[in-house]
Structure formats: structure tokens, C-alpha cells
Image (tube, helix red, strand yellow):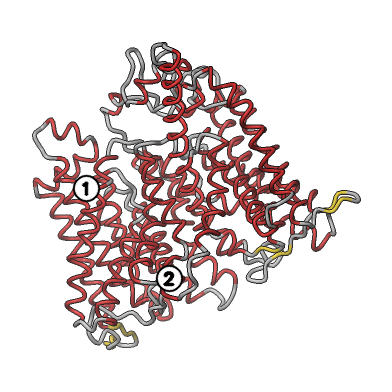
């Protein structure tokens, strides 16, 4: 028993900090409806400011803490609310989740641009002489641990009193249900929301400063990983109860500490299960508590008054432009292939092949999110499974990479179907968190195994040979990758045009209505997950064969988050959007590498392409069809009007929608139209209604 208590005591202060972050998540969610996945990034901002003010500028600890916690923390929250989150309170959960993901990857990159990317070791503690030890019999605790526990208890108690006994707390609870209905009662919902975001960000700053000394350096990835534990603690509190959230944080902190003490040192369980433990708990809670899944979805009662989403460009394109598109696209593809096979340097052909590989992976997001209306945060993990399967088969069994790619795709598809089994009971935020749990399990437990990802050594994946034809050359493999991309794109387009696409559009609008007309919702969800995972697996094999070898770091869970942000930035509903995202990602990376190789520039601008896409994803709030698709529709309409003026005809109003194109472009709902919850343009939940996608 004494050994257990020895392991238990260090887990209590860690659990308290988890609880602080979880309370901030709950506060934000219950007042804005946003499950703020960027909370860890906000904590990182305050921790970085505290470190720089104390270690670099030589400020006293108390001054640095005041600035980081009471000034910077709340200011970040207020800025996010006023510039962004107050405008999406009534938006669908998928919009809120995408915006939070964009901030999660964009905020750390912004900090690197502002303050550089130098390694910041041994962050200071908020408490003077924090390592001073107090003995209680055979046990001991440090001064810093005592202060952490005391601060957490006081903060949670004050927040509980605020929510229970104050009028402001009542308004904060009401604003999430419907800010518009709250304003009908004479309450300024914007002011209430701003206060809630400032208070939540204060908690993020406090947690960041308290957490920093637990690590050897100040790193944004550490705070993102800690967010995992905070989410699990918030789930234990059912996203409503502050005392239960505090208890959940304590239990998780103690559980991880006990696991560290009892698991064998340097074993896979010790290095993998401990960081993945909180999300294992989260998945079990999501599956076991139906009420928790319901509490994660907040729907504004007045959302039915919102106009329908804008149509895609193909649905409003003037018929006179169809001929140009039919001729122009083959000409462009032919010129692209001819250039790559002749005068384009081999190095850039290699870069373009990487873009093709990413485009195939991104097609999996088009299928799952654009067509299925779900968000998966483990697509990079599926790509890794496909790549590692093909590499292992080639290395140990001598199989062709072509056959290995097919086996890897099937393996990834089967794995996707297994991950989809919880999807039969989950959806929205709950499903996204469950898939993120799987990605963390893959990173920490599965990929380090020698028979799969082979740890840091990685796996070699040769380029294929078909008979006497070798694709080892850069241009030859580029041509093969392009053929694979064309085949995958054709599968997605045929699926979208067929009955499967119509079924998915109906499910996206209303699962209940779809089931009443005979659609098997469960089978459709499993199928779309399996197809999506299979596409990601094929893309992973193409990427691995392009590189020659890959390791688990190439398919880290963070890339899954980045992938979603990339695709929604360009256009998640079209094949073209996935290809644009893949090509833009690699080309922009390469162009930015030409920045002068001076340390002051090199370190700060590394990864800036992620920030650019994150900023583009923020436009998803206004243009959920994607910025590229929006521009295409805008210029299509503009060119059509120019043709009308030259021909002396009345301006076209979007023949593809029966005269409603202009109204939709202006954000107006035509008479007789009702919005579709899943992005459709037809009747809500109609099995055979329009799905708003292009052919």
C-alpha cells in the first residue's frame, strides 16, 4: 500500500493541472458551443510569454506570471471571441471543429514567427523554491505541488459559485443554447460570450504556467498532448459538472502516475500506454455514456432560419462555359504531363509526385467529410498502415510493391471499418475525438512495433517493377502515380454520382429521415469509413515509394489535423479540392525553402505554409465550400455576366439552379427553399435530393 501511495502523490498535482485545462474547456463549450481544441495552444502562449519575460528579459517571477496569466491569457481569448468565435455560435459543429483545428496548428506557428524557434530549456516555476520538500512520515511533497493543488481547488470553487449564484453565470449557461434567443430577453450575448472567453483563456494561461516546469523545455507539442488528458477529464465530468471535471482530472493524473510506477521500464506499454491512457478512457466513456454523446452536440433552435449553403461552381456554371471546360481540362492535363516528362527538372518532378501522393490521401477526406459529413482525425494513421504493410511485405516476403499496395489498401480499409464500428453510435465532435484517440494509440503503441512501423528505423518501400518495366526513375514513377491518382479520382466521382452519393447526402441531412426511407445508415457509415481508409492507405504507399523509406514520424497524429485543415481550405466537397490541396502543400513548402538560409530567417519561417493554410481554413466559416471553389464559382458567374452583356442578353442568374444562382451567391435564401443541415440543397433529409456536389 505504501508503494501505491508513493506513486499516487505525484499524480495529484498533475491531475489538478489537467482539471484546470478541462474546466477551461467546459467553460468555453458551455458558453459558446465550441469544443476548443486550441486550448492547449493558448496555454502554450502564456507559458512562452512567462518563460521569455523571466529568463530572457530578467523580470521577477511575480511580474512575469501576472503578465502571462492575467494579461496575455485573457487578451488572447477576447481577441479570438471578437474576431472569430462570436460569429460562429450558431454554426454547425463541423465548422466550429475546423476553426479550432486551424487555431491549434496556427497559433504555435505564429509564436515561432514572432519569437523564433530557439530551444527553451528548464522553464521556471511560478513558485519560488518550488522544489523545496515537505515530509509527511514516509511520504513527501514539494512546495510547487502544494501550491498547484491549492490554486486548482480555489479556482474551481470560485467558478462553481459564479455559475450557481450569480446572474452572469446564468447568462453564460444560456448563451450556448441560443445567443439569439438570449438577446430576445434583453441580454447582450456578445458581452457575455466575451467575458466567458476571457475567463476561459485565463484558465489556459494559469494551466500553461503551472504545467511548464513539468517538462524539460517549452514546446507546443507537449501542451497539445496534455490537451488529450484535459478532454478526457472534461468527458468524465460530462462537459457540465465542474466538481466531476476536477475529479476526472485527478483520477487521470493519478492513473498515469500509477501506470508509470508499475509498468516495466522501457517497455512498449510504459512508453506507449501511458500517454494514450487518457484517450483510451475517453473512447470507453463515449461508448458507455449515451448522455455524454448527446451533450457534445449543441444545436441552436433558430438555426433553421439560416440561409442554405452556397452551391458549387459546377451547379451554377453557364452552359456556354461547359464547352470551354470540356476542352480546357484535357488540354491542361496533357500539357502538365508532357512538361513533367520532358523539360521540367527531375527535382521538381519528384516534388510533384509527392503532391500526387498527398492528393490521394486527401481524397479520403473528400469522401469522409465532403460526402459523408464526418470528420476523422486519423487519416495519416491509415496512410501509415498502408505504407508500412507494403514495405514489410516487400522487405520480408519479397512481394511486389504493386501487390503490397493492394494488400496495404485492403488492410487500411479493414482497419477503417473497425474504427467505424464506434461511428455507428458516435458522430460530430465525439467521433472526431474517438478517431484522434486511435491516432494517438497508433503513434504511441502500434507504429513503434518492429513488425509494423519498426520504430525510429522505419521501413524501406522500393519503387515498383511490372514485368520488364521498371518505375525506379523519377519521371516513370511520376507517370505511374498520376495513373493511380486518376483511378482513385474516378472511383470517388462515380461513387458521388451514384446511389451511394445520394444516400450519403440524405444521411448528411438527417439520419432519421434517411432511415425512414429505407437507407441502412449503419452500413453506409462503415462503407464510407472503409473506402476513405483504403484511399488513405493507397496514398501512403505512393508517398512511401516516392521517398524510398518512411518512419512513424512521417505519419504522426499532428499531420492528420493538418490534412483536414488543408483540404477544407481549398474545397472538401470536390476531387479538385483534394488535388489542389496536395499540390499546393508541397509546392508552397518548396518555394518557402528558397528563403535566404540565414538562421534568423530559416528557423522562423520553417512551417509557415501550415500557418497560411490555417488562416485559409478560418475562411471556412464564410465559405464552407472552400476558398478555391468559392473563387471558381465567383469567376464563373462573372464571366457568364460578361458574355451576357456582350451578347445583349439579360444577365444569367445561374441556370444550373433554375435562376437561384445570384441569390445564393449573395447569401440570400430563395423563396421556398429550406436549409439542409448536411450541406445539401434539396429537402431536408431527402434520400434522392440534391447533394450540392459537382459531377
Name the element at disc 2. Answer: helix
Query: Which residue appears at 33% of the width and 84% of the height?
Result: 139
Quadrant of the snapshot with the N terminus? bottom left
Q: Residues within 10 Å of mark 2 (few under 14, many from 20)?
A: few
- Where in the figure is residue 610, as x and y percent of width and height? 45, 56
Instruction: Identify the residue position indicated by label 2 in the image.
Output: 601
Farthest residue, direction right: 468
Res 307 visible: yes
Residue holding disc 1: 82
- In the figure, is residue 23 to the left or right of 376? left
Question: In front: 18, or 529?
Answer: 529
**Image: 196 above or below 318:** below
In the shown orientation, is residue 21 left or right of residue 106? left
Disc on the earlier residue, 2 or 1: 1
Percent position of residue 23, x then y? 27, 57
Figure quadrant of residue 451: bottom right
Q: Is residue 677 left or right of residue 539?
A: left
Amino acid at each position: 500500500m505504501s508503494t501505491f501511495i508513493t506513486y499516487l502523490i505525484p499524480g495529484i498535482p498533475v491531475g489538478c493541472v489537467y482539471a484546470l485545462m478541462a474546466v477551461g474547456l467546459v467553460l468555453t463549450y458551455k458558453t459558446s458551443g465550441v469544443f476548443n481544441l486550441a486550448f492547449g495552444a493558448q496555454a502554450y502562449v502564456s507559458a512562452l510569454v512567462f518563460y521569455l519575460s523571466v529568463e530572457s528579459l530578467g523580470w521577477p517571477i511575480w511580474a512575469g506570471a501576472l503578465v502571462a496569466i492575467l494579461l496575455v491569457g485573457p487578451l488572447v481569448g477576447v481577441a479570438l471571441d471578437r474576431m472569430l468565435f462570436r460569429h460562429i455560435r450558431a454554426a454547425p459543429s463541423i465548422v466550429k471543429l475546423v476553426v479550432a483545428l486551424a487555431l491549434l496548428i496556427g497559433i504555435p506557428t505564429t509564436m515561432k514567427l514572432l519569437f523564433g524557434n530557439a530551444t527553451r530549456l528548464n522553464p521556471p516555476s511560478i513558485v519560488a523554491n518550488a522544489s523545496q520538500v515537505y515530509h509527511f512520515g514516509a511520504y513527501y511533497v514539494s512546495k510547487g505541488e502544494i501550491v498547484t493543488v491549492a490554486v486548482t481547488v480555489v479556482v474551481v470553487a470560485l467558478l462553481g459559485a459564479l455559475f450557481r449564484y450569480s446572474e452572469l453565470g446564468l447568462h453564460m449557461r444560456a448563451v450556448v443554447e441560443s445567443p439569439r434567443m438570449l438577446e430576445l430577453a434583453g441580454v447582450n450575448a456578445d458581452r457575455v460570450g466575451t467575458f466567458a472567453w476571457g475567463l476561459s483563456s485565463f484558465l489556459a494561461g494559469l494551466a500553461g504556467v503551472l504545467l511548464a516546469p513539468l517538462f524539460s523545455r517549452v514546446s507546443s507539442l507537449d501542451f497539445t498532448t496534455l490537451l488529450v488528458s484535459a478532454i478526457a477529464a472534461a468527458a468524465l465530468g460530462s462537459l457540465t459538472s465542474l466538481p466531476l471535471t476536477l475529479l476526472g482530472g485527478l483520477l487521470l493524473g493519478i492513473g498515469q502516475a500509477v501506470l508509470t510506477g508499475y509498468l516495466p521500464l522501457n517497455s512498449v506499454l510504459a512508453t506507449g500506454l501511458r500517454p494514450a491512457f487518457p484517450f483510451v478512457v475517453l473512447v470507453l466513456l463515449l461508448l458507455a455514456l449515451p448522455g455524454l454523446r448527446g451533450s457534445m452536440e449543441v444545436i441552436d433552435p433558430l438555426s433553421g432560419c439560416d440561409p442554405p449553403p452556397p452551391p458549387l461552381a459546377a451547379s451554377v456554371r453557364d452552359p456556354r462555359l461547359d464547352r470551354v471546360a470540356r476542352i480546357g481540362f484535357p488540354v491542361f492535363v496533357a500539357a502538365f504531363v508532357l512538361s513533367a516528362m520532358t523539360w521540367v527538372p527531375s527535382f521538381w518532378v519528384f516534388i510533384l509526385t509527392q503532391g500526387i501522393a498527398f492528393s490521394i490521401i486527401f481524397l479520403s477526406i473528400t469522401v469522409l467529410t465532403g460526402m459523408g459529413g464526418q470528420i476523422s482525425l486519423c487519416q495519416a494513421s491509415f496512410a501509415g498502415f498502408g505504407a508500412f504493410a507494403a514495405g514489410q511485405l516487400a522487405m520480408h516476403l519479397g512481394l511486389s510493391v504493386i501487390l503490397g499496395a493492394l494488400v496495404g489498401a485492403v488492410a487500411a480499409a479493414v482497419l477503417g471499418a473497425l474504427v467505424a464500428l464506434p461511428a455507428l453510435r458516435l458522430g460530430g465532435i465525439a467521433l472526431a475525438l474517438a478517431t484522434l484517440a486511435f491516432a494517438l494509440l497508433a503513434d504511441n503503441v502500434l507504429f513503434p512495433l518492429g513488425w509494423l512501423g519498426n520504430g525510429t528505423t522505419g521501413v524501406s518501400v522500393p519503387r515498383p517493377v511490372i514485368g520488364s518495366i521498371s518505375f525506379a526513375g523519377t519521371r516513370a514513377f511520376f507517370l505511374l502515380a498520376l495513373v493511380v491518382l486518376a483511378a482513385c479520382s474516378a472511383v470517388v466521382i462515380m461513387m458521388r454520382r451514384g446511389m451511394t452519393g445520394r444516400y450519403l447526402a440524405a444521411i448528411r441531412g438527417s439520419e432519421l429521415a434517411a432511415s425512414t426511407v429505407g437507407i441502412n445508415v449503419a452500413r453506409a457509415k462503415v462503407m464510407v469509413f472503409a473506402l476513405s481508409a483504403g484511399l488513405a492507405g493507397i496514398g501512403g504507399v505512393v508517398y512511401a515509394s516516392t521517398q524510398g523509406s518512411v518512419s512513424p514520424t512521417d505519419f504522426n497524429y499532428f499531420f492528420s489535423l493538418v490534412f483536414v485543415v488543408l483540404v477544407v481550405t481549398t474545397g472538401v466537397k470536390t476531387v479538385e479540392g483534394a488535388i489542389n490541396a496536395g499540390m499546393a502543400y508541397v509546392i508552397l513548402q518548396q518555394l518557402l525553402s528558397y528563403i535566404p538560409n540565414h538562421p534568423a530567417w530559416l528557423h522562423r519561417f520553417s512551417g509557415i505554409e501550415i500557418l497560411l493554410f490555417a488562416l485559409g481554413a478560418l475562411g471556412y466559416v464564410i465559405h464552407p465550400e472552400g476558398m478555391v471553389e468559392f473563387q471558381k464559382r465567383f469567376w464563373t458567374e462573372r464571366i457568364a455576366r460578361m458574355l451576357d452583356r456582350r451578347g445583349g442578353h439579360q444577365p444569367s442568374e445561374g441556370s444550373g439552379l433554375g435562376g437561384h444562382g445570384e441569390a445564393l451567391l449573395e447569401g440570400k435564401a430563395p423563396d421556398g427553399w429550406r436549409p439542409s443541415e448536411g450541406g445539401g440543397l434539396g429537402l431536408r433529409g431527402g434520400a434522392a435530393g440534391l447533394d450540392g456536389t459537382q459531377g
